[in-house]
Image: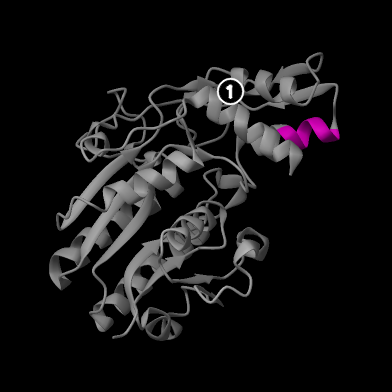
């Protein structure tokens, strides 16, 4: 009997590597494909020489390589993407190619293969744009993203639902809050730590400081993903976040405290478009998680605790 594997795209990245850890620890053999543009081999170092892990440096933009990558895999976890929400760090072409085109190539390979039971996809809360209903439910609409990142994730969702409906596999879509934790190498907490290391007397905070969002600790993210697979509909869409939110000034104070730099002055830039940190920055975000709770999941950590644990890991890393 052939032993089938789980395929994880972007498995050397922040969220992907934690998912790989979980899958292997729970008895799965895993094949990771990653172009290592933002991921790192160090994130999977504990599985070096372990036969349960295959790691292949593969770019999803090279569709010709994906048939072989999928061979023998019955589950697909699609986490590979350009992670940058701030348009200063990623161009429209980056989002189109690395998110939309890469997802299309993967779905085409799944269509040709026919072996896979499901694809689980990490989307984003940014697909909601500036939702008027907070906390925001999965059935909120219309979905009007205000960033190219959010638009690319929404386009990927549309591709997944159509391919699942037409070609017989399941699609599980997860709209994630801001995921934080060990191995994260971008985002507000990471940026604050780097800024204070460079300038211990002053911390620059983008925007007016009132941006208020939900932060999801990586352990809760992984358990949420695994719980969502259990329902079994053709298409399932789940929010994953914490039950509360915190603002950017509170995050700044937490990072200062964890670094022992409580006297550092906070300098607000004032931001743009009503105090946003950057063009396309959603100021208020909190997700309704009742759908995922209905299949037995609940987050362990609130936003403030997730931020503090992450600050400690980034500082100590």
Q: Within 10 angstroms of label 1, few (less than 14), some, or many (20 or more) residues?
A: many
Q: Which residue is mark 1?
A: 248
Instruction: Identify the image quadrant of residue 241.
Output: top left
Can residue 94 be seen in this snapshot?
A: yes
Which element is circle 1 on?
helix
Residue 100 in the image: state x and y as whole percent.
39, 62
Q: Considering the image in quadrants, where does the C terminus appear? A: top right
Q: In the image, residue 70 lies at what x, y percent?
A: 37, 79
Image spot of residue 115 (x, y percent): 25, 79
Q: Main secondary structure of the magenta part?
A: helix
User: Residue drawn at (61%, 23%), measured in percent from left and top?
Assistant: 251
Left or right of 100: which side holds 172?
Answer: left
Residue visible at 31% across and 24% down in the picture = 135
Residue 138 sits in quarter: top left
Magenta-span inclusion, residue 195: yes
Question: Which residue range is magenta in the image?
Answer: 193-198
Q: Is residue 183 left or right of residue 19?
A: right
- Please say whether residue 305 is one of the residues in the magenta stretch: no
Counting from the top left corner in percent of width and height, residue 114 is at 23, 79
Residue depicted at x 61% and y 18%: 249
């Amino acid at each position: 009997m052939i032993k089938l594997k789980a395929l994880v795209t972007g498995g050397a990245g922040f969220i992907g590597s934690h998912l790989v850890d979980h899958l292997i620890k729970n008895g799965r053999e895993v094949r990771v494909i990653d172009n290592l543009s933002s991921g790192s081999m160090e994130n999977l170092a504990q599985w070096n020489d372990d036969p349960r892990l295959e790691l292949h440096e593969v770019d999803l933009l090279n569709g010709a390589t994906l048939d072989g990558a999928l061979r023998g895999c019955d589950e697909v976890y699609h986490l590979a993407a350009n992670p940058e929400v701030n348009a200063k760090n990623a161009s429209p072409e980056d989002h189109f190619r690395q998110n939309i085109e890469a997802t299309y190539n993967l779905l085409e390979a799944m269509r040709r293969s026919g072996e896979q039971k499901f694809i689980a996809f990490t989307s984003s809360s940014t697909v909601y744009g500036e939702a008027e209903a907070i906390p925001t439910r999965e059935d909120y609409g219309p979905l009007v993203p205000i960033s190219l990142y959010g638009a690319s994730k929404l386009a990927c969702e549309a591709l997944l639902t159509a391919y699942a409906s037409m070609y017989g596999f399941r699609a599980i879509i997860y709209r994630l809050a801001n995921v934080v934790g060990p191995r994260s190498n971008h985002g507000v907490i990471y940026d604050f730590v780097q800024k204070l290391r460079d300038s211990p007397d002053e911390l620059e905070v983008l925007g007016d400081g009132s941006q208020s969002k939900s932060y999801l600790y990586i352990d809760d993210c992984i358990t949420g993903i695994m719980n969502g697979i259990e329902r079994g509909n053709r298409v399932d869409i789940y929010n994953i976040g914490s039950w509360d939110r915190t603002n950017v000034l509170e995050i700044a104070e937490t990072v200062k405290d964890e670094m022992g730099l409580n006297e550092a002055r906070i300098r607000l830039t004032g931001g743009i478009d009503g105090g946003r940190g950057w063009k396309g920055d959603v100021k208020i975000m909190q997700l309704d998680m009742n759908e995922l709770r209905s299949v037995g999941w609940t987050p362990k950590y609130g936003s403030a605790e997730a931020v503090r644990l992450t600050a400690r890991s980034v500082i100590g890393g």
